[in-house]
Image: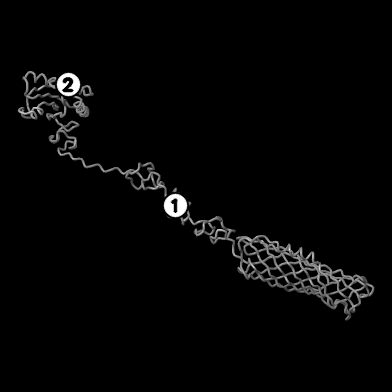
Amino acid sequence: MHLTSRRLCASVTAAFLAGTAGSAFAGDGWYLGLEGGATKQRQSDDKTIGGGILGTQSEFQSKYNTGFLGGVTSGYSFANGLRPELELVYRQDRYKTIFGPGFSNEGDGRKDTRSAFANLWYDVKADSGFFKTVHPYIGVGGGVSQLWLENVGSAGNELVNDHDTVFAYQGGAGIGVDLTRRLTASVDYRYIATEKGQFEAGPSGSGNIVESSNNGQSAILSLRYVLAEAKPADFDGDGVPDRRDNCPNTPTGTPVDLKGCPVDADKDGVNDKLDVCPNTPAGATVDAKGCPIDSDGDRVPDYADQCPNTPPGTNVDAKGCTIEAPKPAVIDTDRDGVADGIDQCPNTPAGAKVTANGCAVNQSLVLKNVHFAFNKAVLTNDSQTVLDVVAKTIIDSPGFSIEIGGYTDAIGSDAANQKLSEARANSVRSYLIGKGVSSSVLTARGYGEANPVASNDDETGRADNRRVQMRIVN
């Protein structure tokens, strides 16, 4: 008969304006569905055009018994909740009563509705919890319906047996439950309405027309089966869908955890793929390779280094602290408490009290390299260096009295040699006092050419005899 094409096109276009899909849930993707249920037409206000079919009545009402419906669907379920769908559905409602002012007749016929809808549903979805499996939904649809009116009347009078195609729309809400990843069951409520169609009434060619529409409610049970599951969107290709990927830009090939973040077993901030030192203790400061930092280069990482500023090359223990080199064993042959290396009187009697340089009472020590100007008592510079050490030794040896003795060779007269030896002994004593030695512990004595230690017949012997000695008096 007729079709409101403009409204149909607008409805179909709106139904397929779905957003971009995110990552897949159970039941997402292309699906086919089956549906069935009960339908109940509301009382309709019909009328005739041309009159005569119902006597003088041109307007009447129709009541209907509860009918049934069945249909098939096909659509695509997006992860963002939008679900565009095509639906083909058949509804059958049988007339119960036809009545108007002053008359009421039993209906003896049916009204069939064959509809094609483009629907758009919105499902509530979540990654976890109740709405991960159970999805309330709401939606609308628009399309066309072919209405059939058959054998409307009473007492065997055929009033109408004709059909018309009209614009139809519906709205509804329901709840879907994911039974498996591919199978979803749902129950919903629908309200459907159509434009009025025009149907030829009475004998063919009479020109009489009945106007009627479908306006009713439905309770529907349905099953949807996903033919091709939607693949979860995974921008970085790490196997974790974008909707739960907390690290969406992970480099390709990097092992990740359930949240899509690089695995970092030792939690040092360097993912396991790059971590050269994968078992770093918790809290350790690491470099870009995941290895503990060793700021002072002593091979003990900072987190364990209790001496963090050790000089490079220092031998350290496990705590990063310097290991002291073992001291060499002290050799003291005469057991006087002064090591052989500094003991200038190495044969001290056992138990004797000694000075800092290992000499005991009545022991003498030649002060080597103490020299004077020729035939004078003036000390040379190199002698002063030796006497500085002697002064320190005497100061470090309290409780001793020291004699400084001067000696000459046999060249010259005895008197001259005696005088020169005394002058040189006093010169040494004066120098030592000047270096802090108490004058009370020092005496000076000249021995001239007495007590030679070598022959005076050659220069080597005479040089040895020209000497200064330090003797421990008491």
Neighbours of disc 2 within 10 Å: few (<14), some (14-19), many (20+): some
Q: Residue furthest left?
A: 457
In the image, what residue type sits under mark 1?
Answer: Gly
Q: Looking at the image, is 291 positioned above or below residue 216?
A: above
From the viewer's perspective, tell me whether residue 135 is left or right of residue 365: right
Q: Which mark is residue 290?
A: 1
**The residue tagged with tag 2: helix, strand or loop?**
loop
Q: Looking at the image, is 78 positioned above or below residue 277?
A: below
Q: Which mark is residue 378?
A: 2
Classify the position of the C terminus by image quarter.
top left
Q: Residue furthest bottom?
A: 156
- Residue 444, position as x, y percentages in the image: 14, 22
Give me the residue at 42% from left, 49% from top. Answer: 292
Q: Looking at the image, is 275 positioned above or below residue 227?
A: above
Distance from the alpha carbon under mark 2 to that under mark 1 = 73 Å
**Where on the picture, by quarter, is residue 199?**
bottom right
Q: Residue furthest right?
A: 56
Relative to the observer, which residue lies in front, 343 or 411? 411
- Residue 81, position as x, y percentages in the image: 66, 61
